Amino acid sequence: MSNGGKDDTQVPQSSLKGEEKSSALGPGSPAAKESNAKSQDLREGGVAGWATAIGAFLVQFCTYGYTISFGVYQDFYAQTYITNETSSTIAWIGSTNAFLFEICGLLAGRMYDRGYFYHLLYGASLLQAFSIFMLSLARPDNYVQIFLAQGIASGCAVGLLYVPSMAVLSHHFDKRLAQVMTFASSGAYLGAVVHPIMLNNTLNGQLGFAKGVRASAGLISGLLLIASLLMRTRLPPSESRTNFVVAAKKCGRDSAFIFGCLGLTIFVVGFYYPLFYLQLDAVRHGLGNTFSFYSLVIMNASSFIGQLSSTVLVGYLRVPAVVTIATFCCSVILFGMIGVHTVTGVVVFGVLYGYFAGIFLALWTPVMTLLTPDLSELGVRMGIACAAMAIGGLVGPPISGALLTPAYIWWRGAVFNGIAAALGCLMFVIMRRILVRRSKDKSTLVSEPSSSVNGLGGGPSEDQS
């Protein structure tokens, strides 16, 4: 299994086991043919590969990068545009968007596995552009119009684009897959730097809400068009169709995968709190509109650096260890939000939290990849992981808004989300311990000559899954 031995920390190793798995399955089986074809024909990148990676970067910029910029809308709606609703009610717009971003990964993963990559790419890109253009038509204090356009339509589009845009990278890369995935996912935080700057200066400037949102929609439409022209598949769909029920049952017997999904669910409850409320926090503490508008930019710029630096850290500490450290640091820093009342405090908090949040965002996908012993099931497992994150993303921000109350009692949100993040970190610690134990068990099996042949047949993988 790819998460045994040293394989549990390096994503590329999973695909290097193709020939071993095919020999165990039998040379005539469809899975064996596909595995041999990939191992013999796969090149690292090439023009099409790097074009696809750049396209995936742009997709992340226009989708999840827009979702995690919702803090700008949260502040603008609460202060100006939807003043007849509470912060908790407004947060349901962003949390529903985040929920659908994750939950639609289940459908997208299944469709990707069946060869519908281009249908997802073109259709969801059109939906994302359409939903933001429709948002610009929403009237002030009309919560339902905004919820449908930004919460529902945009959330579905973002969710349908994420899994295929990341999974298709495995068609072009093997040894560099983890690094390329990190590069692509960093587009989200570059987007989370650009979008808040643009939105704050248009929504609160001369353009106003309608024209400002249309300008944002135009930018996203153009970039998604470029991404659609750049991205290409290289391998045919799997000849052996992955049965969702069978794959889900295997996930249910994989203890490391279970704790990984629990960690994603619980950690994400607290993860979105600063993304939704940091700018509003700065405004309510009277730190000035100009600085408050750039509070999210500071945090997201640090996240972008964190995502890029995660590739270096993985080379020294390996993926599960880096994710565990990042989530632990995020939980500690969330507690520190209790004392954020000044410009200096907001800057320090934004830089530190943004950096470690960026590392987490960059590496959760490689974690799911290395927890997938059979890469033909990658779409299913990523979809299940997205669904797990969806639950936390849906309930976290509204609960935080309710805890704040109309009086904005900020320490309540900090304590609740700090505890949630700490519990999520604990789940990742357990996941990592299971992977370490499997590594030792596999090393023992490999060292015994009588077990080496059976080891190539994936015996340990069955136990682990």
Image: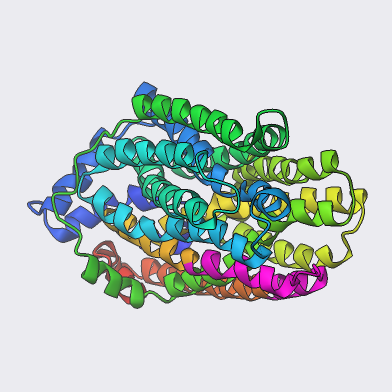
Horizontal relation, residue 144 to residue 44: left or right: right
Residue shown at 38%/21% (left/top)? 47
Instruction: Name the residue at the left extreme.
Output: 28
Q: Is residue 407 visible in the rendered structure shown here? A: yes
Percent x, y of residue 329: 73, 62
Q: Identify the coloring.
A: rainbow
Residue shown at 54%/64% (left/top)? 393
Horizontal relation, residue 1 to residue 425: left or right: left
Residue shown at 67%/63% (left/top)? 87
Residue 46: quadrant of the picture = top left
Front position in the image: 198 or 383: 198
Q: Is residue 407 above or below residue 47?
A: below
Where the N terminus falls, by quadrant? bottom left
Where the C terminus falls, by quadrant? bottom left
**Secondary structure mainly formed by the magenta segment:** helix
Q: Is residue 70 above or below residue 436?
A: above
Instruction: Name the residue at the top extreme.
Output: 47
Percent x, y of residue 70: 61, 49
Percent x, y of residue 400: 67, 69
Q: Is residue 465 visible in the rendered structure shown here? A: no
Q: Is residue 400 magenta?
A: yes
Horizontal relation, residue 46 to residue 146: left or right: left
Q: Is residue 249 magenta?
A: no
The boundaries of the magenta stretch are 391-419
Horizontal relation, residue 460 to residue 137: left or right: left
Front position in the image: 295 or 227: 295
Q: What is the total number of numbered labels drawn onto the structure image?
A: 0
Front position in the image: 29 or 73: 73
Percent x, y of residue 350: 78, 50
Residue shown at 83%/42% (left/top)? 289
